[in-house]
Amino acid sequence: MADGLSRRQLFGRAAVVSAGVALAAPATAEAAADDGTVEVSFVLNGKPQTLTVDPRVTLLDALRERLHQTGTKKGCDRGQCGACTVHIDGRRVVSCLTLAVTVRGKQVTTIEGLAEGETLHPVQEAFIACDAFQCGFCTSGQIMSAAAVIAEGRARTDAEISEAMSGNICRCGAYPNIVAAIRQAGGA
Ligand code: FES
Ligand code: FES
């Protein structure tokens, strides 16, 4: 292609790019209603959000169905695949096993909030450079997990990365490239 990127690279770039980052203070309003719903306020990708939710609603469903953050994927919906990984106050969690009400007053980051505007996060850049995806379904979870693994200082060797990333399943088997991308992004 004219700009030197292949069709696959462009597709991949679209899969790992997310928009919209701004810093803001957390809002902490909360309330209970007669119908059992509760109000939860938190900061999503730098922007204050307030939702009224059934207390049984997962963070994953709140993100995807109420806040339209569909970069976070629903794979198994039972904590076994890592496709739904997001950050809460900088720590990775599987959002399918996290109740939305538990993020009250916290900072939630999804793949949509990882880039700084047009500037990709180093892990996103590395996934593209290392061709670390095939279908892309697991990719947002892999990237969110990888960013946290690097921040945790657990990306020093391939074995360490594989262990730290063991909760993120890739049905396409892109593991060698994923590990390579994490090593590149982590400077190992
Ligand atoms: Fe959450 Fe699989 S969808 S771990
Ligand atoms: Fe297809 Fe990981 S790239 S599941």
Image (tube, rainbow, N blue to C red):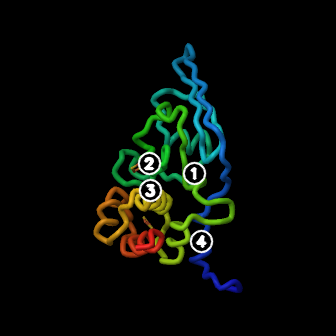
* Whole-number angstrom distance, CA of label 4 to CA of label 1: 16 Å
Q: Which residue is drawn at 59% across and 31% down?
A: 41
Q: Return the residue at label 2.
A: 91
* Whole-number angstrom distance, CA of label 2 to CA of label 4: 28 Å
Q: Return the residue at label 1.
A: 70
Q: Return the residue at label 4.
A: 11
Mark in the foreground, 2 or 4? 2
Residues at badges 2 and 3 in contact (C-beta under 8 Å)? Answer: yes
* Whole-number angstrom distance, CA of label 4 to CA of label 3: 24 Å
In the image, residue 167 sits, relative to residue 24, either above or below, namely: below
Pinpoint residue 29: horizontal percent, then vertical percent. Answer: 61, 25
Pinpoint residue 101: horizontal percent, then vertical percent. Answer: 49, 31
Residue type at mark 2 is Arg
In the image, residue 34 sits, relative to residue 44, either above or below, namely: above
* Whole-number angstrom distance, CA of label 2 to CA of label 3: 6 Å
Residues at badges 4 and 1 in contact (C-beta under 8 Å)? Answer: no
Q: Residue at x 35, y 69 (%)?
A: 156
Pointer 3 or 1: first along the chain: 1
Query: Quadrant of the image for the N terminus?
Result: bottom right
Q: Which residue is drawn at 34% across and 51% down?
A: 80
Pinpoint residue 169: horizontal percent, then vertical percent. Answer: 36, 60
Pointer 2 or 3: first along the chain: 2
Residues at badges 4 and 3 in contact (C-beta under 8 Å)? Answer: no
Pointer 2 or 1: first along the chain: 1
Q: Return the residue at label 3.
A: 148
- Residue placed most toward the observer, 85 or 64: 85
